[in-house]
Image: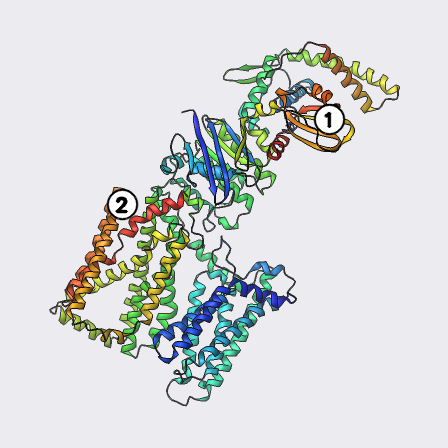
């Protein structure tokens, strides 16, 4: 089976608020799938649908070809999940937690877990409630990773963590992906991390899927152009085919679809000079789509 | 809000506005009903005081800790520690006196102790209560047991002047006892002030250090899980046992040690008191199972949140497995609690108990069962089993509403239990004698009602157990069969007159249908 | 080999940045001919980038004839590269004398760099466009 996750026309409302609007995407085996979006865009909601924590109101969610709501054991046994909020029980000790988790997953690799423990510097006898936020995240990562899951899901793994912990998490992502056939889905709003490691990126904005394509395609498709006008423009110039135009006075930045626009020609047409024409960063693409 | 004191008071008021209104309502109701003195008025009075103590439970419970501690967020306010400690204490004492004042007219029957004396004792109790909650935060939920014990001690102190011979000698007179209690209250206030001040500047409080010195080697010596778990269900059983299973045994053990044991020593000269204490000891697990059961039926024991925590929801376990684990943990908790009770009873009854009334009861039982010792042992064993099943039933019967995640359902279910408890307390035997048991028509009507209830129960069971997997159904039917058999045997042996009614009632006791509903309710909560 | 600082948000794709860095290391002699480059997995873990990026960088280098992928052993620098290093060493004095002369004309560093880039850009524009890989 090629597609690890297949989401079709998924919608979800919470009261009057539509958290997801008709989202369809697929995640194929062996790729790193980055899910980006601002706070409240629906990333966590989508991820919780994959885990069966939310039931699909309309549309369908299939993970490993199975429905996570009706077959939780089969699906969850192959998933490793690191949640955004620290949710490990505080009263447990580190070794107790690992022994508890080991009982659920047949592929638990004790040597790998011990190696990670040593690398992260976690004390086996420490109570989880005494761990700092970064140590807590690392422990959660070990718990999610040590059974070498077919699908590793990280929900905003880096939020509020220092660069060293973030590095550890990215390393785990890379390690997972170099193991044959394993997939990673991670949601983040730290876009430079997403740019580093993702193959595919999906961008959610207020519940709608704005973009879902391989990262290289996205970067090839978008360009950033800096126009300089002779006279100060009172309103943003109307640039045909632009996703977003931003700026003030004489200088305006345009994020546009690279295949449909020839920079110099467009600038001449508007009566401005093209100062800069370069590939847009994921950050700028994201903001452009979010604000459009 | 111009004064910090006013701000702190306003916060307490705002947070507990509804409870305050409830207390006012209860007081008004109690005053109105005062014309007919009955135990109902006593219940109302007790409830209003309990609610008041609930309001002045001046603690914040953070999610990870569960049980509360003095609100640390107040430490960053520009207010001195003395004021932080004094405001809730003074407000609490003032409110308690106010409530006592509004009830003293109602409680005019209780003329033996003067209202002033009671007022002093109540104020002192409020100070002790808050001091216990703040300083002993390491004990967690055991604080309530300690608070209960202190309440009983204060009550006993209140009884001191009224003991024979009257009028009491100087040291036992009301004035002196009141003064001493007030003095101890002032000392405990000073201790809690010091503790709060230390907490504020994080200075490893020495009182906490001493407890730590005791607790740390204990918790290190406690058997830690060393071997791997055999199966996911075993692992989750351990998890549930550690997070919620220990509550009932700890409470029972605490009550036995702190309350029953000392009282049993004082009652060693009085056979009637010993008998009553024995009944209370046997009833303790059952009574304690009511509040513990309400907390146990929630997905997380210590948290108010009714949603399934994601840590548990993401485990590869089915809803049937999760419910089965909870039921097994309840059984283990019940067995442990009853083992504690039985071992305590063995020690007590063989060593220092006054067995006058007890031996009379046992010999009555012996004659009733044809002078057979084996039968008496059998009946006692059956009675213990019945007690265990009752306790277990109270823990487990609310699982369907607690695990459903629907707050309205859970609150309704809890309220029905509370109403039942209040009804049981307010139950007056005088009502029964008025009810002619000998009238066969009434009995037949009662039998019909109970028979319909039994039929409804089994219909619901047949519907709800359809979707549960077969192994669990078989296991539970065995348990249900054993429990119902115990009740049936006891009913048949001891009730010749209303046998039909008692048989039907014993068929009702062990929960069947509701437990079958629990997995589907949990599934609905897990996959919202 | 010093770890390169890859900037994902700059205009250049990550694999090209890695290719540039490796070429620079070879040119300056930090990596010598015949040496083995780290495996794809190790490189990806050290740099915290997707292994596919490393694979593309290595393939690019292979197509330019700088490295060879030996199945089962790894990625090795070609011997022919040493020729390139010598070439680079020969070119150094040319650049040095040119920069000396420009400095004698009282041009500062920024001016010199701007002139160099202009010249290269003109030559690039004049050349037929080399087919870029998608």
Name the side, left or right, on which C94 lies relative to A138: right
Residue located at (33% from left, 45% from top)? B520
Locate the N terminus of chain A and report the quarter of the image it occupies.
top left
Closest to the observer, A134 or A219: A219
Indicate the quadrant where residue B317 lies.
Answer: top left
User: Dot 1, crowdedness within 10 Å: few (<14), some or many (≥20)?
Assistant: many
Work out which residue is located at the far bottom of the displayed protein and give it. Answer: B167
Indicate the quadrant where residue B8 lies.
Answer: bottom right
In this rendering, the count of numbered labels is 2
Work out which residue is located at the far top of the displayed protein and give it. Answer: C128
Q: Is residue A113 visible?
A: no
What is the chain identity of the residue bearing mark 2? B
Locate the C terminus of chain A and report the quarter of the image it occupies.
top right
Name the side, left or right, on which B84 lies relative to B224: right
Q: In this rendering, is residue A244 above or below B415?
A: above
Element at badge 2?
A: helix
> Mark 2 highlights which residue?
B472
Q: In this rendering, is residue B30 above or below C72?
A: below
- Asked whether disc 1 touches disc 2, contact meaning CB atoms under 8 Å apart, the reply is no
Closest to the observer, A58 or A167: A58
Element at badge 1?
A: strand
- The disc at residue B335 is none
Residue located at (73% from left, 10% from top)? C126
- The disc at residue A227 is 1
Q: Is residue B475 visible?
A: yes
Q: Residue A263: percent from the left, percent from the top?
A: 69, 21
What is the chain identity of the residue bearing mark 1? A
Q: Residue B450: percent from the left, percent from the top?
A: 21, 60
């Amino acid at each position: 089976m090629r597609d690890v996750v297949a989401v079709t026309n998924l919608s979800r409302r919470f009261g009057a608020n539509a958290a997801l609007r008709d989202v369809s995407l697929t995640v194929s085996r062996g790729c790193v799938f980055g899910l980006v979006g601002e706070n409240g865009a629906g990333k966590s909601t989508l991820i919780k649908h994959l885990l069966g924590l939310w039931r699909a109101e309309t549309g369908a969610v299939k993970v490993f070809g199975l429905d996570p709501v009706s077959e939780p054991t089969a699906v969850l046994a192959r998933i490793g999940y690191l949640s955004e909020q620290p949710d490990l029980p505080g009263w447990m000790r580190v070794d107790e937690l690992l022994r508890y988790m080991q009982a659920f997953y047949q592929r638990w690799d004790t040597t790998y877990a011990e190696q990670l423990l040593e690398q992260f510097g976690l004390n086996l006898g420490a109570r989880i409630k005494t761990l700092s936020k970064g140590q807590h995240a690392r422990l959660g990562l070990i718990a999610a990773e040590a059974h070498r899951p077919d699908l590793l899901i990280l929900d905003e793994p880096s939020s509020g963590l220092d660069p060293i912990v973030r590095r550890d998490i990215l390393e785990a992502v890379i390690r997972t992906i170099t193991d044959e056939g394993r997939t990673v889905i991670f949601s983040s709003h730290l876009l430079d991390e997403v740019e580093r490691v993702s193959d595919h990126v999906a961008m959610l904005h207020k519940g709608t899927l704005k973009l879902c394509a391989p990262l290289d395609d996205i970067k090839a498709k978008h360009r950033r152009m800096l126009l300089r006008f002779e006279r100060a423009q009172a309103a943003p110039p109307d640039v045909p085919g632009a996703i977003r135009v931003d700026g003030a006075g004489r200088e305006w930045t345009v994020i546009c679809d690279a295949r449909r626009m020839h920079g110099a020609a467009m600038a001449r047409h508007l009566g401005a000079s093209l100062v800069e024409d370069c590939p847009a960063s994921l950050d700028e693409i994201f903001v452009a789509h979010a604000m459009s | 809000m111009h004064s910090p004191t006013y701000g702190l008071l306003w916060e307490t008021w705002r947070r507990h506005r509804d409870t305050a209104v409830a207390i006012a309502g209860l007081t008004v109701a109690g005053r109105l009903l005062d014309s007919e003195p009955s135990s109902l008025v006593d219940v109302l009075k007790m409830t209003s005081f309990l609610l008041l103590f609930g309001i002045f439970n001046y603690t914040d419970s953070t999610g990870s800790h569960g049980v509360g501690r003095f609100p640390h967020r107040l430490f960053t306010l520009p207010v001195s520690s003395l004021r932080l400690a004094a405001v809730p204490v003074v407000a609490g004492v003032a409110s308690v006196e106010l409530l006592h004042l509004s009830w003293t007219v109602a409680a005019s029957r209780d003329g033996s102790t003067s209202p002033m004396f009671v007022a002093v004792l109540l104020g002192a109790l409020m100070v002790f209560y808050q001091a216990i909650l703040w300083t002993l935060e390491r004990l967690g939920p055991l604080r309530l047991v300690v608070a209960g014990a202190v309440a009983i001690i204060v009550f006993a102190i209140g009884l001191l002047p009224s003991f024979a011979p009257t009028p009491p000698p100087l040291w036992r007179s009301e004035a002196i006892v009141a003064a001493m209690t007030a003095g101890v209250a002032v000392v405990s206030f000073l201790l809690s002030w010091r503790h709060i001040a230390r907490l504020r500047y994080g200075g490893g409080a020495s009182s906490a250090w001493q407890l730590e010195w005791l607790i740390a080697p204990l918790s290190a010596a406690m058997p830690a899980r060393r071997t791997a778990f055999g199966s996911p269900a075993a692992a989750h059983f351990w998890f549930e046992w550690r997070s919620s299973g220990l509550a009932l045994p700890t409470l029972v053990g605490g009550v036995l040690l702190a309350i029953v044991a000392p009282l049993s020593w004082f009652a060693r000269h009085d056979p009637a008191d010993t008998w009553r204490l024995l009944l209370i000891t046997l009833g303790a697990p059952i009574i304690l199972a009511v509040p513990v059961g309400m907390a146990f039926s929630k997905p997380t024991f210590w948290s108010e949140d009714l949603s399934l925590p994601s840590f548990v929801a993401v485990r590869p376990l089915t809803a049937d497995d999760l419910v089965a684990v909870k039921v097994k943990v309840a059984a283990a908790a019940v067995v442990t609690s009853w083992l504690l009770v039985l071992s305590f009873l063995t020690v007590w009854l063989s060593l220092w108990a006054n067995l006058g009334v007890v031996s009379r009861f046992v010999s009555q039982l012996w004659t009733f069962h044809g002078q057979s010792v084996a039968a008496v042992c059998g009946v006692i064993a059956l009675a213990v089993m019945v007690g265990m099943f009752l306790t277990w039933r109270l823990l487990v019967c609310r699982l369907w509403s607690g695990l459903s995640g629907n707050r309205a359902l859970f609150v309704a279910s809890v309220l029905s239990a509370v109403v039942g408890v209040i009804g049981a307390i307010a139950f007056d035997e005088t009502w029964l004698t008025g009810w002619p048991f000998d009238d066969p028509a009434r009995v037949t009507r009662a039998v019909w009602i109970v028979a319909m209830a039994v039929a409804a129960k089994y219909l619901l069971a047949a519907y709800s157990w359809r979707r549960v997997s077969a192994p669990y159904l078989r296991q539970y039917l065995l348990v249900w069969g054993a429990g119902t058999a115990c009740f049936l045997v006891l009913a048949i042996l001891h009730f010749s007159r209303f046998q039909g009614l008692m048989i039907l009632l014993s068929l009702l006791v062990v929960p069947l249908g509701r437990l079958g509903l629990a997995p589907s309710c949990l599934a609905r909560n897990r996959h919202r | 080999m010093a770890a390169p600082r890859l900037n994902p948000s700059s205009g250049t794709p990550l694999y090209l940045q890695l290719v540039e860095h490796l070429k620079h290391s070879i040119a300056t002699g930090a990596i010598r001919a015949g040496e083995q480059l780290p495996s794809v997995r190790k490189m990806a873990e050290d740099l915290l980038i997707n292994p596919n990026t490393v694979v593309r960088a290595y393939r690019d280098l292979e197509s330019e004839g700088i490295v060879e992928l030996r199945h089962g052993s790894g990625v090795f620098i070609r011997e022919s590269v040493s020729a390139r290093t010598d070439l680079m060493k020969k070119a150094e004095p040319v650049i040095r004398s040119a920069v000396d002369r420009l400095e004698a004309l009282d041009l500062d560093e920024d001016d010199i760099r701007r002139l160099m880039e202009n010249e290269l850009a003109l030559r690039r524009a004049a050349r037929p466009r080399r087919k870029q890989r998608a």
